[in-house]
Image (cartoon, rainbow, N blue to C red):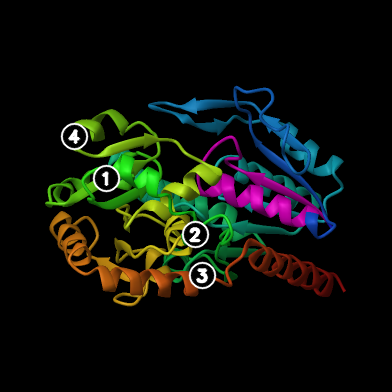
Amino acid sequence: MRVVIVTESFPPDINGVAHCALQTARHLVRRGHRPLVIAPAVPDPAADADAPCPVVRVPSLPLPGYAQVRVALPSRRVAAAIAAHRADLVHLAGPFVLGVRAMAAATRLGLPAVAVYQTDLAGYARTYVGTGEGTAWRRLRTVHGAADRTLAPSRAARRDLEAHGIERIRLWGRGVDTVRFHPAHRDPALRRELAPDGELLVGYVGRLAPEKRVDLLAAAGGLPGVRLVVVGDGPSGPGLRARLPHARFLGRRTGDDLARIFASLDVFAHTGPHETFCQTVQEAMASGLPVIAPAAGGPLDLVAHRRTGLLVPPEDPDALREAVAALAAAPGLRAAYGRAGRAEVAGRTWEALGDELIGHYLEVLRERTAVAA
């Protein structure tokens, strides 16, 4: 099967859309399929040297105020690349700018398309500009409404899509590398470095951006015997360093280094209220950590309250602080939540989720064939 993956982001970018697109391409290659990736251009000309398949880059510009995010510019290269690949199906990863053009090209070429909803763009519009939610949803309706199938990562995301008139929705979650993210990677030397006085390590991993609300950790960071660890980078970094003066900021980490940090924490705390899924929660669970997360969006499907962690009201610093204090005082409970979380994600490998995705592709192709007949 020849599949074109059109993605708004791809490595070396570090975010959920880029990671999922990469894992999808890898899995298709492993299963003997022929993927092609179309993504915004990045400054590094050698960025795709280790890509699992050919990558076509289209011209792009950095997002004003957030240079790590690049936005594709209008380009005829999208339609030309889809046609040249002789695609059987187009996979739209987090479509919004590049994905809209790809959906139009797929329609002109008579190709089926599967659109993967991954980013709460309406929520981002509200966070960054205080308006624009309606415009964001109109654009999302354009592309998802034209797709043969939309894949939502969580029940909350599916409800949002349905509430805005989008149909033909199925659930498709995300995989997690349960070998890389594993409690066995806990590092006593790293713990001594981060917590020289034996403090409880409470960590956040993710982009440092306004919508992630990492500032909510300030109250928890004031608890006696608690040390905050923040992993990631982004435009909010300088402000957060001032707001969380006693936290350890480790910057951007990836691969085995990131897995070692995860496993060396005691509690994982996610703060963003706009997650359609939240991959770092899964990685924390695979690492054997109890999780604290907002009772909103994707975490509602991932965190079993009082079994694998604690769900707290979104954007409530006092509730977050109380949850951290409760787990700090109960090492047995932390261990029990961590074991349960690890067991919960044990079967959610990228191989299993990749095969599930291929199943969606095949159903869409069969449906197209049936209609044509």
- Between label 3 and label 1, give the one nearer the viewer: 1
Is residue 344 toward the left or the right of residue 210 in the image? right
What stretch of residues is rendered in magenta?
2-29
Crowd class of label 4 (few under 14; some 14 to 19; many from 20; radius 10 Å):
few
Q: Is residue 180 magenta?
A: no
Q: Which mark is residue 245?
A: 4
Is residue 68 toward the left or the right of residue 235 in the image? right
N-term-proximal mark, 2 vs 3: 2
Q: Which mark is residue 195?
A: 1
User: Which residue is label 2 attached to?
Assistant: 184
- Label 4 sits on what residue type? Pro
**What distance separates the C-alpha of mark 3 from that of mark 1?**
28 Å
Please say whether residue 131 is visible from this viewpoint.
no
Instruction: Tell me, yes or no, whether the two marked residues, 1 and 2, touch with CB atoms within 8 Å.
Output: no
Point out the image quarter for the C terminus.
bottom right
User: Which residue is label 3 attached to?
Assistant: 345
Which of the two residues, 365 or 293, is positioned nearer the viewer here?
293
N-term-proximal mark, 1 vs 2: 2
N-term-proximal mark, 4 vs 1: 1
Which of the two residues, 329 or 3, is positioned nearer the viewer here?
329
